[in-house]
Image: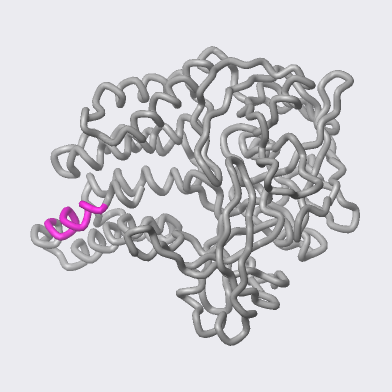
Amino acid sequence: MRYLLTILFAFAFSLQLLAQQPTAVDANARVGALINSADYVTLGEELPALRAKVAKPLLALADALVAYSEGRFEDSNKAIDVVSEFAPELGSEVVFGMQNLSIINYLSAENYKAGAEVVQMLLVLLPEDEAADNRRHLESLDRWFAALATKSPVEMVRPEKDVVIPVEVRGVGNGEHLVIDAKVGDNVEKFIFDTGCGNSNFISTAAAERLGVEIVAEHILVRGFAEGYAKLGFLPEMQIGDITIRNATFCVVDKIVPENAEVEGLCEAVLGTHIIRKMGEIRFEREKSCFVLPAEESVAPKQRNIFFDSHYYIWCNDGDDRVVMHFDTGNNKTYLSSKYYNRFTERVEQEGSDVERSRSGGFGGVEWCDIRTLPKVEFDVCGQALQVEKVAVTMPTKYEDGTPYIEPYDGVVGVDFLTAREVVTFDLSRMFFRVDK
């Protein structure tokens, strides 16, 4: 949302001119700055103390973005409705951008019927000279929402006891995947447990046929290491351990990773966050190689440390500095980004290995980059140390025109983040990650 909100600097400046009290000036300037920097975590922390002094248009915008980042998708859309009332103050571009954000909320909340109405409205409002990429994206979402508008959202039926799901910690490339079994009838399919796969599951055409996945739409735009199209599939019911999962959706592609990736041990199916979120609290026990979904939820940390921005992110500390990491267990290892390199250049240069080439694979292709490898990085997660070894740091790159490309977050949390300690617990509904043992 950064590119949609940059004009808020002008809005915040006008408030400074109009405000009669310095405290109101400070509050509005601070909220405007946090929105422009897309720091919704800090915004959520500071907004309660500032809200009485914040102008109504800016407050509506802040409420929408904080609710979005906290995974309160319905609340975010209610606030976006209020934002639309302030088009004269905020500008039509900001309102249009927030309406685009509402689509992500509807998709995440699986409210496909309401999402379809917004998509169709935006297609009408989209300027003729708007980039073709934006139109293709909206048209793809229109097909997605229309296909599922009459379907029910994902439902999870579980016994009233602790549910134990065996996990295979499978070596893949230079790291590991967490693999679980899903069953449909007599057919059992291996699924990668992937917190980086949003709003659906991925599956190969062959695996979809084995499980009886129904194709309900074509030409769904998906992005990974490259852009491509998938079919949209629907499965009325499948079993994971003692859990019955109803109404799962799938992006169906010929191959999840291209053949030239040359990596052994890959699965043909990926379990995504629209199911993982419904599982609620998940405890990973390394020694027993299992997930445990407790019958009674534990007490969540006082301060959430997961937030949402199209995907899920964990924030923790590296020394005295906060770092924000994409929570993506589909990655077999944790790695740090070019943004991290720019923040901690001296340390990476002193402690890291020589520069070497590294290859990553995913949907649509493979990607090469230059890296330095740190022997270890110790993160502080809610006061508990979690050490990850041999962590690659991506070196800065440039676009074709020479403009520097810096990733927006500090890196990616992979499987080794979970296996670094004996027991960790996370919950994508209550938005926390905790080290237990």
Q: Nearer the viewer, residue 48 or 280?
A: 280
Q: Residue 71 vs residue 383: left or right? A: left
Q: Position of residue 65 (x, y in %)?
A: 38, 46
User: Residue at 42% across / 21% down in the picture?
Assistant: 142
Q: Position of residue 118 (x, y in %)?
A: 35, 24
**Residue 387 in view:** no
Q: Residue furthest top?
A: 150
Q: Residue 117 vs residue 218: left or right? A: left
State the quadrant of the C terminus: bottom right
**Residue 182 in view:** yes
Q: Residue furthest bottom?
A: 350
Q: Position of residue 386 (x, y in %)?
A: 70, 69
Q: Which residues are magenta?
A: 6-14
In the rendered picture of this protein, how many numbered marks are placed on residues?
0
User: Residue at 53% across / 19% down in the picture?
Assistant: 218
Q: Is residue 243 above or below residue 381?
A: above
Q: Is residue 48 above or below residue 294?
A: below
- The part of the image, by quadrant, that contains residue 215 is top right
Q: Residue 104 vs residue 259: left or right? A: left
Q: Nearer the viewer, residue 426 or 134?
A: 134
Q: Nearer the viewer, residue 21 or 165?
A: 165
Q: Is residue 434 magenta?
A: no
